[in-house]
Image (cartoon, helix red, strand yellow):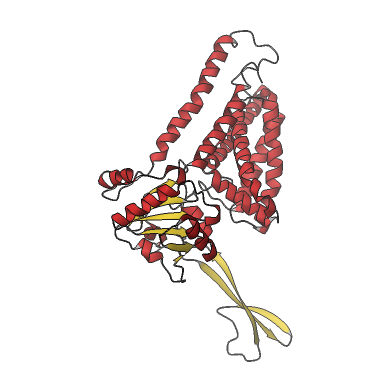
């Protein structure tokens, strides 16, 4: 009997750790790119005919990110065990049927549960949620037996601190570029290389079938046995089914047009020297408080004979209105709005490229001056190398900054309260 109880407790702790780790990871990667999660929420609202509520997508994104991360931290540390497991269970009871709907009807191809860090299919998301739901049900039933790292006197600090830190981290990433870029247009990437298909890579495989009719009866044939020589059969329709998905390059396509409707991608990708791209997915919503810096960058490009383009998804009317409003002299190119939002999470944002390689990207809050670009040209970037991975240093600092206060509170809790005899209600 004791062995059975011990195994049950071990399983409960294992399930708690599993759900906690998944929630912390999911909340963290979405906090790295809150704009991406905002876009995903907007997609859901559009699919469900709730486009009028898109203005609330950003607030909802921040709230959900912080809540998910906080629940994960509280699960891992055993804080407020009853309420934490109950709230997590309620969330999974909502998310599991939702992801079943997504898997069955596929209104969006990616649920966005792990942002761009880990993209899984809707069916994989549903099965993942089934496992998490089963785990959290077991944990909730046995929540009283879970280990708790803090006593009730200091346990309140954990959820408040975790929620505030996650909100701040997400807010910082929203007002700058994501600390870690999980998208295919990260710094150091050569776009033409990411669009190429390696030799020998598997191709898409399709099954073709043909429907013919004879004497009022329809019959389906394969490519090998369709009645091509029998005139008694009348062709009705053909069908094509994807049997196996082949290799898909990280960047499927890079389509850019000039204002006359001509292909213009080669102007960017085949430029042998340096060029600057001002990217504004929607000029109508672009922030205007960095216009002087943008003008200075355009002048710098002109002086150094660098091509300078503004890449936008806006209409010709919006481009004309922007030009009239800002006095912009740089040429405009047009691309899909979704592509531009994928390239950079800033409206507007700046991209520095060379020979199709992205050297550096800047948020509009961090636009460089002439001295900074000149220094980069003569030092780290003179041979085409980039500061790829620079964001990881800030992540390590952030992890240390987050864990240190929790550790100090735990030490104080252990020294001040733990030596006393454990009484009912001293842990939460």
Residue 199 visible within the image: no
Identify whether 248 is placed above or below 115: below
141 with respect to 122 (left or right): right
* Image mark count: 0
Percent across and percent down for residue 176 are 47, 42
Percent across and percent down for residue 4 are 67, 27
Q: Quadrant of residue 150?
A: top right
Camera-side residue of 124 and 314:
314
Percent across and percent down for residue 80 are 66, 25
Identify the image quadrant of the C terminus.
Answer: top right
The residue drawn where x is 46% and y is 71% is 260
Identify whether 403 is placed above or below 49: above
Q: Quadrant of residue 254?
A: bottom left
255 with respect to 297 (left or right): right
| Residue that extends furthest to the top in the rendered view of this protein | 420
Camera-side residue of 237 and 324:
324
Percent across and percent down for residue 233 are 65, 88
Identify whether 219 is placed above or below 3: below
The residue drawn where x is 70% and y is 28% is 83
Camera-side residue of 10 and 347:
347
Q: Quadrant of residue 303?
A: bottom left
Identify whether 16 is placed above or below 248: above
């Amino acid at each position: 009997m004791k062995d059975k109880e011990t195994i049950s407790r071990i399983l409960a702790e294992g399930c708690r750790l599993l759900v906690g780790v998944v929630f912390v990871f999911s909340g963290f990667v979405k906090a790295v790119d809150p704009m991406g999660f905002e876009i995903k929420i907007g997609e859901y609202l559009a699919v469900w005919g709730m486009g009028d509520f898109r203005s609330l997508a950003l607030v909802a994104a921040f709230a959900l990110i912080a809540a998910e991360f906080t629940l994960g931290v509280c699960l891992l540390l055993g804080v407020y065990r009853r309420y934490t497991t109950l709230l997590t269970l309620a969330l999974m009871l909502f998310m599991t049927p939702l992801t079943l709907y997504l898997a069955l009807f596929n209104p969006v191809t990616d649920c966005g549960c792990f942002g761009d860090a880990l993209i899984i299919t809707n069916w994989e998301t549903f099965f993942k949620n089934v496992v998490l739901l089963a785990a959290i049900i077991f944990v909730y039933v046995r929540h009283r037996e879970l280990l708790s790292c803090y006593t009730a006197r200091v346990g309140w600090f954990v959820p408040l601190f975790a929620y505030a830190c996650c909100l701040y981290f997400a807010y910082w990433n929203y007002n700058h570029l994501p600390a870690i870029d999980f998208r295919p247009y990260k710094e150091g990437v050569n776009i033409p290389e990411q669009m190429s298909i390696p030799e020998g890579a598997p191709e898409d495989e399709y099954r073709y079938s043909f429907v013919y009719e004879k004497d009022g009866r329809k019959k389906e044939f394969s490519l090998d046995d369709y009645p091509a020589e029998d005139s008694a059969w009348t062709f009705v329709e053909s069908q094509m089914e994807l049997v196996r998905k082949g290799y898909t390059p990280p960047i499927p396509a890079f389509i850019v047009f000039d204002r006359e409707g001509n292909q213009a991608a080669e102007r960017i990708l085949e430029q042998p020297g340096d060029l600057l791209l001002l990217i504004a997915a929607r000029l109508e919503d672009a922030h205007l408080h960095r216009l002087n810096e943008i003008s200075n960058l355009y002048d710098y490009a002109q002086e150094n004979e660098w091509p300078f383009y503004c890449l936008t998804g806006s209409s010709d009317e919006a481009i004309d209105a922007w030009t009239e409003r800002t006095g912009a002299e740089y040429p405009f190119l047009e691309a899909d709005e979704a592509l531009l939002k994928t390239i950079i999470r800033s409206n507007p944002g700046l991209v520095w490229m060379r020979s199709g390689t992205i050297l550096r990207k800047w948020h509009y809050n961090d636009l460089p001056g002439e001295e900074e670009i000149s220094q980069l040209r003569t030092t780290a970037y003179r041979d085409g190398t980039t500061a790829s991975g620079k964001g990881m240093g800030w992540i390590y600092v952030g992890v240390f900054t987050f864990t240190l206060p929790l550790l100090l509170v735990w030490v104080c809790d252990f020294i001040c309260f733990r030596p006393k005899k454990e009484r009912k209600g001293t842990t939460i």
